[in-house]
Image: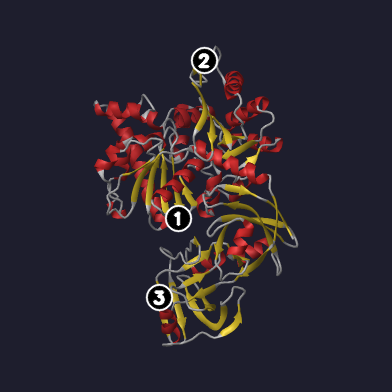
Amino acid sequence: MHILVINCGSSSVKSEIINTISGDRILEMNIHRILDTPIIECDGEEIHCEKTGHDFVLNKAFPLLLQKIGDITINAIGHRVVHGGQAFDEPVMITNEVKKAIEELNPLAPLHNPINLLGIQIAEQYFTDIPHVAVFDTAFHATLPRRAKTYAIPHTLSQKYNIQRYGFHGTSHEYVAKEAARFLNSNIKDLRIITCHLGNGSSMAAIEYGRSVETSMGMTPLEGLVMGTRSGDIDAGILLYLQQKENLSIKEIDDLLNKKSGLKGISGDTNDMRDIIEKAAQGDDHCRLAIQVFAHRIRKYIGAYSAVMGGVDVIVFTGGIGENSPMVRHRSTQRLDYLGAIINEDKNHDIHLSKDNPIGEFSWNHSKVKLLAIQTDEQLSIARQTEKLIQEDLKVNTIPPIPVAISARHIHLSRETLDQLFGEGYELTVKKPLSQPGQFAANETVQVIGPKNQFETVRILGPVRSKNQLEISRTDEFFLGIDAPIRESGKTENTPGCVLVGPKGKVQIHDGVICAWRHIHMTPQDAEIFGVVDRDIVDVKIQSDERSLVFGNVLIRVSPKYKLEMHIDTDEGNAAEIGKGATGVLYITTDGNAQLTKKKLKTV
């Protein structure tokens, strides 16, 4: 497909017609200095506008773009929208209702969403018979766990005003994380990745096995790293203090934090890192401090995110600064030897990224953690997500419903642990077969002791496995006093342990306690019918007696040994009021390249 991507920013607009297979740009139009001295550049032609402002400039630019397009077929238009709030966690077709919802989110991204929406509205006037799609910066971070997205303010206010961490730069974080996995010949679901998007706006993300679990920007793009003109993290008490001392209005505080702080505020002159580095080399102490603070904040977040994920495998630098500044990469990654991240200074300084060379590694071969600089391509990511939505929105599939099973807490034991708890050579006895072929609930149980409380009888599931794994719910983890991460079965590295007690002994297991990632077992034949592959991520709509509910981020597991069935834990089953015999419908899938695919499905 040929997708026209429109990225309408506060002072510039970037438009490209992209071949989604090759990534080639068929036609480009860039608009600069919209609020100052607007210049439209398109296909070698440069036009200086006599008036400023998005309304005037876009109404002059889009007719020129249409003229240049000529006979090129445009299949759809993808619009970047910064804030999707709680309403949008995936790309959507733009309707009047969607535009209204985007407008309602303006207070959460006042510098971005109003301009994004204006770009959509004006584009619709000129591209009337082409589907328009909104792709949201916040969507990738919809997987943040509650502990990461919740602010410590009264929950009544959080609920009333939808206050939570949303995160931004999602298309960039997602894109470079996938590119890192591809470069390392690894599955992204096997990696713990920290992505550093560094530019005039900067943010970081912790991506654990393909899911965003932490990110530095918050409810708005103001929180987190030091940015070009934005302060990033700041003690809220400072604002109260300055308001009293300087008698600042709300608007003046907004301007202070968003337009006068960050690199510009510290340097006292500029927000351009290139200029700051040059002046620092000439002895400007304010610019030297700006660089030091900028890199210190990045390094602090790297340490924090490593702790959140229990380690890190890859650290990626991207964005205008991350891709092009060896100094920033050096200062941000020095003294990370304790993590196993060892910078190769020669490689770092030799990196020159381009379309033909979009990835550069600057860690030593023996470095446990790989350090990469990757050229981001948010435009291509938006184009491909738009393409997937358009293609699959035209399809109607008839597929079987998915039976839903609720998994109570249970434990899988290794041969060694079973021997220690029940005696050498002990064999589990079958209480009842489970729905998955060859698996059974055993008559045997163990006592599980956590730091706070204990469960007297936890059912063992057989047969024995290669490693121990205790699967509990969120309620269980609070009862036991254990902080159990959400993991797919078998991913027990860097998870907490507990004490197990059996009739013949006691065993301290050092890892293996997880909250199971909700998942669907299916055969290869089922996978072909559903159009998915092993370890894809899907959404499932479940219709219960009382209501319907959509479960997002459901993991697909494919094996000839499996039987079609979705597993959720007791907390999720209770919350959804799901009873015996419930079924689900797969209606959103993520393909092997993690592009969103929407399917209109009905059950048979």
The answer for how far apart the CA atoms under marks 1 and 2 are is: 46 Å
Disc 2 element: strand
Q: Is residue 368 left or right of residue 497?
A: left
Q: Could you classify mark 1 by the number of other residues whose Cα lies within 10 Å: few (under 14), some (14-19), or many (20 or more)?
A: some
Q: Quadrant of the N terminus?
A: top right
Callout 3–callout 2 Cβ contact below 8 Å: no
Callout 1–callout 2 Cβ contact below 8 Å: no
Name the front one of labels 3 and 1.
1
Q: Nearer the viewer, residue 502 or 556?
A: 556
Q: Which residue is mark 1?
A: 187
Q: What's the residue type where badge 2 is placed?
A: Ile
Could you say where residue 124 lies in the image, as x and y percent from the top left? Answer: 66, 28
Whether residue 13 is visible, yes or no, is no
The answer for how far apart the CA atoms under marks 3 and 2 are is: 72 Å
Decide: is 96 above or below 122: below
Q: Could you classify mark 3 by the number of other residues whose Cα lies within 10 Å: few (under 14), some (14-19), or many (20 or more)?
A: few
Badge 3 or badge 2: first in the primary sequence:
2
Q: Quadrant of the C terminus?
A: bottom right
Q: Which residue is mark 3?
A: 508
Disc 1 element: loop
Q: What's the residue type where badge 1 is placed?
A: Asn
Q: Nearer the viewer, residue 499 or 597?
A: 597
